[in-house]
Image: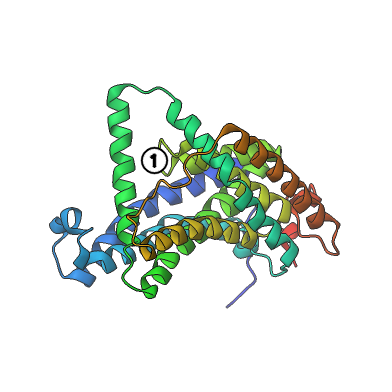
Amino acid sequence: MNQYYEPLPMKPSREFFYLILMWLLFMVVSVFASVITWWLMTGQSIAMLETDLLKPDNLNAFKMIQVVSTVIMFFVPAYITARRASSHPMKRLGFVKSFKYDRLLLALGIMFCVLPLVGFMADVNKAIPLTPSLKKMFEGLESNYMEQIKKIALFTSPLDYIVALIVIAFFPAFVEEVFFRGAMQQIFLRWFVHPWLVIFITSLIFSAIHFSWYGFIPRIVLGMMLGGIFHYTGNLWYSIAAHFFNNAFMVTILYVQHLQGKPIDTEIGDSAPWWAGILSLILVIFLLRQLHRVSVTKVAPDSIAATPDTDDNRFSV
């Protein structure tokens, strides 16, 4: 017999630890899923996965593994946690049906205008002194990550560009926003209340999980922009669109480099003068305030910041 089921309310602390437990569990599941995907697509043994993964003949398998592992690792734990806490998991994660183009344009404008600030913070990050051993380790991790990006962005046709947009830009943007903004940020908001403290903590974890020292501070800045967009609009689609725009911008630059016959440079835009960073910060603050204003003053506002109530009803359409 089918009956309407409403889960019992969960305390934010319990919901957070449940989310992390699910993340750890499905991280293990993602490893097994990656191995199975590798075997099904290549027919090769597991022992060959680490050494042959980035070979040209196995790039399709590598791309599929990227998609499968990120979906399992980030989307599934967030959805299960939301389903455990609410009978409307997608609404709890911030998926709202209403859509306004002015908010979308402002969200994209924020992500574009923050790029000089991100470049300046990358310079700041690089200037932090490290011991020789740490520097060698971090440079090795960064080199491996950039090598993976270059392999995925190996363009032989316009179709490869579209595939790169899907694998590098869309899927990471979608699943990471669901996990970090839709799930984690909202749990912290119900727990700690203070919005920008919550946004900073979430962005700190968001950056740390990427295991990139040289991108650590810049990624915190990007995470805070995405967190602010979601907080002010209350609609996860806007932060997904903004995240996708940021990723797609990088992929497009790599594709243009390919069309011009230039070697792929993944570090382009990773530097900016201090004055550009300050101007960027001023523009971003202005655009965030505009986004807040239009999100709370329009008819039927969907902004989280418009109402102090943290109940699921704030996401209803």
In the rendered structure, the answer to whether residue 52 lies left or right of residue 117 reads: left
In the rendered structure, the answer to whether residue 222 lies left or right of residue 77 reads: right
Residue 57 appears in the picture as rendered: yes
Instruction: Please report the residue visible at 55 percent of the width from the left and 35 percent of the height from the top.
Output: 273
Of 151 and 270, which appears nearest the observer? Answer: 270
Few, some or many residues within 10 Å of mark 1 (<14, 14–19, 20+)? some
Instruction: Please report the residue visible at 34 percent of the width from the left and 55 percent of the height from the top.
Output: 264
Quadrant containing the C terminus in the rendered view:
bottom right
Of 261 and 241, which appears nearest the observer? Answer: 261
Residue 186 appears in the picture as rendered: no
Quadrant containing the N terminus in the rendered view:
bottom right
In the rendered structure, the answer to whether residue 87 lies left or right of residue 154 reads: right
Q: Is residue 243 above or below residue 272?
A: below
Q: Is residue 195 above or below residue 161?
A: above
The amino acid beneath tag 1 is: Phe
**SS under mark 1:** loop
